[in-house]
Image (cartoon, rainbow, N blue to C red):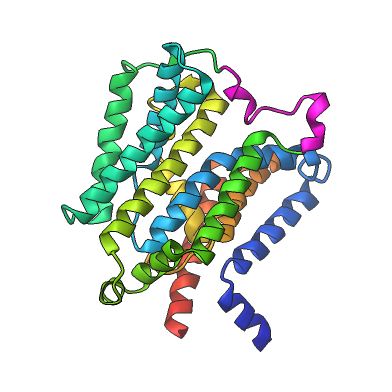
C-alpha cells in the first residue's frame, strides 16, 4: 500500500488514468453494444483532438504558474484567418502557416502583457480574450465564412475504406505527436527545466540566473502556436471560419489540465495527465449520450470531477 501511494504521489496522472479506466468500463458495461465499439472509441479520440492539443499548451503555461483565458478566442480567430486565406487564393500550406503565425503573435502579446506591463495573467488574458474575439468577428464581418477546405477537412473525418489501417484520422496522430514532443521538451530540455523552476519558485529561479521573462514570453507564444494548431483542427471539423465558435473552450482546456494532475499554483503538471483529463471529459460526454442522460446531468458530473480533482491536489500539497 505504501508503494502504491508513493507511486501515485510521484506520478499524479495515474489517478486520473485510473478514473478514466473506471468510467470507460462503467459506460461499456451499461452499453456494451454501442459504447464499447471500436468506432465509438475512434469518434471519442477525434472529439478530444481540439481540447487535447490546446491542453498541451495550457499545461506548459500552468506549470509556469500562469493561465490563459484567450484559448477559445484564438481558436475562433484561427478558423477565420484560415478561411480568409483560403478564400483569397492562398495554398493550403500557406493558410496553415499564416493561421499558426497569427496565433503565435497572440501568444506573444499575452507574454509581453504579463512580463513587460506586469499585468496578472488572469487579467491580461481575460482582456485579450475579448480583444481577439472582437478581432475575429471584425475580420469575418460578424458572419461565418464558407470556403473550400482544400483537404483540411480530412484531418478529422472518418477514414475511407482504403486507409482503415491508420486506425485514426491524421488529426489524432498529429495530436499524439504534439503531446510526445511537448513531454520530451519538459523532461529533457533546459527550457522544460526552467518552466518547472519558475512555476515552483519564481524568485529562486531568478536568483539561479534563469531569464524568467524570456521563458514566460516563449511559453505563451509556444502555447498559442499549439492553440492555433487546435484551431486548424476545429476548422477541419467545421469547414467554415466561425468567429463565434469555441466560446468557453478555455474552461474545458483548463479543466483537462487540472483533472490530469496539474496544479494552478504552478510547478506541477504533465502532458499525459492533460491528455487523460481531456479524454476523460470526452468519455463522460459520449457515455452520457449513449446512456440517455440529459445534458445537465453530464455538466454536473463533469463539475464534480473537476472539484474533486482540485480538492485532491490541495490535499496532496497539504500532506507534502
Can you say whether 311 is above or below 293 in the image? below
Q: Which residues are magenta?
A: 150-166
At which x and y percent is residue 192?
A: 45, 63
Residue at 52% x, 21% y is 92
- Residue 297: x, y in percent? 56, 47
Q: Residue furthest bottom?
A: 2
Q: Is residue 273 visible?
A: yes
- Residue 234 lies left or right of residue 153; in this view the side is left
Residue 125 in sight in this render: no
For this view, does 73 lie left or right of residue 301? left
**In this view, which residue lies farthest toward the left?**
117
Task: Identify which residue, 15 or 201, lies in the foreground.
Answer: 201
* Residue 189 x, y percent position in the rendering: 48, 63
Tell me the quarter of the picture where residue 39 sits.
top right
* Residue 195 coordinates in the image, percent (x, y): 40, 64
Q: Pick the residue in front: 77 or 23.
A: 77
User: Could you tell me which residue is drawn at 79 percent across and 29 percent down?
Assistant: 163
Residue in the image at 58% along x and 66% along y: 13
Q: Nearer the viewer, residue 40 or 275?
A: 275
77 with respect to 167 (left or right): left
Residue 222 lies, with reference to residue 86, above or below; the image says: below
Q: Residue at x 51, y 47 (%)?
A: 299
Q: How many marks?
A: 0
Residue 152 part of the magenta segment: yes
**Quarter that holds the N terminus:** bottom right
Asked if residue 210 lies in the magenta stretch, the reply is no
Q: Quarter holding the C terminus?
A: bottom left
Residue 87 vs 248, above or below: the answer is: above
Amino acid at each position: 500500500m505504501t508503494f502504491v501511494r508513493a507511486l501515485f504521489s510521484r506520478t499524479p496522472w495515474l489517478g486520473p488514468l485510473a478514473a478514466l479506466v473506471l468510467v470507460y468500463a462503467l459506460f461499456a458495461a451499461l452499453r456494451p453494444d454501442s459504447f464499447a465499439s471500436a468506432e465509438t472509441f475512434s469518434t471519442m479520440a477525434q472529439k478530444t483532438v481540439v481540447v487535447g492539443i490546446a491542453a498541451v499548451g495550457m499545461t506548459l503555461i500552468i506549470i509556469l504558474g500562469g493561465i490563459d483565458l484567450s484559448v477559445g478566442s484564438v481558436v475562433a480567430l484561427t478558423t477565420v484567418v484560415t478561411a480568409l486565406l483560403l478564400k483569397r487564393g492562398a495554398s493550403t500550406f500557406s493558410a496553415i502557416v499564416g493561421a499558426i503565425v497569427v496565433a503565435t503573435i497572440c501568444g506573444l502579446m499575452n507574454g509581453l502583457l504579463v512580463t513587460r506591463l506586469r499585468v496578472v495573467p488572469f487579467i491580461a488574458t481575460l482582456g485579450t480574450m475579448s480583444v481577439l474575439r472582437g478581432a475575429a468577428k471584425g475580420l469575418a464581418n460578424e458572419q461565418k465564412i464558407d470556403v473550400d477546405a482544400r483537404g483540411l477537412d480530412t484531418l478529422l473525418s472518418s477514414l475511407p475504406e482504403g486507409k482503415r489501417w491508420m486506425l485514426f484520422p491524421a488529426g489524432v496522430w498529429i495530436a499524439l505527436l504534439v503531446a510526445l514532443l511537448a513531454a520530451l521538451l519538459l523532461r529533457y530540455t533546459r527550457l522544460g527545466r526552467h518552466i518547472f523552476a519558475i512555476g515552483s519558485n519564481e524568485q529562486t529561479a531568478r536568483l539561479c540566473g534563469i531569464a524568467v521573462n524570456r521563458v514566460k514570453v516563449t511559453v505563451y507564444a509556444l502555447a498559442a502556436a499549439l492553440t492555433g494548431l487546435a484551431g486548424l483542427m476545429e476548422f477541419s471539423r467545421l469547414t467554415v471560419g466561425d468567429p463565434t465558435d469555441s466560446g468557453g473552450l478555455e474552461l474545458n482546456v483548463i479543466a483537462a489540465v487540472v483533472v490530469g494532475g496539474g496544479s494552478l499554483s504552478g510547478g506541477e503538471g504533465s502532458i499525459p495527465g492533460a491528455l487523460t483529463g481531456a479524454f476523460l471529459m470526452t468519455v463522460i460526454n459520449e457515455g452520457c449520450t449513449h446512456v440517455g442522460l440529459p445534458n445537465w446531468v453530464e455538466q454536473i458530473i463533469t463539475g464534480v470531477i473537476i472539484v474533486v480533482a482540485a480538492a485532491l491536489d490541495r490535499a496532496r500539497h497539504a500532506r507534502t
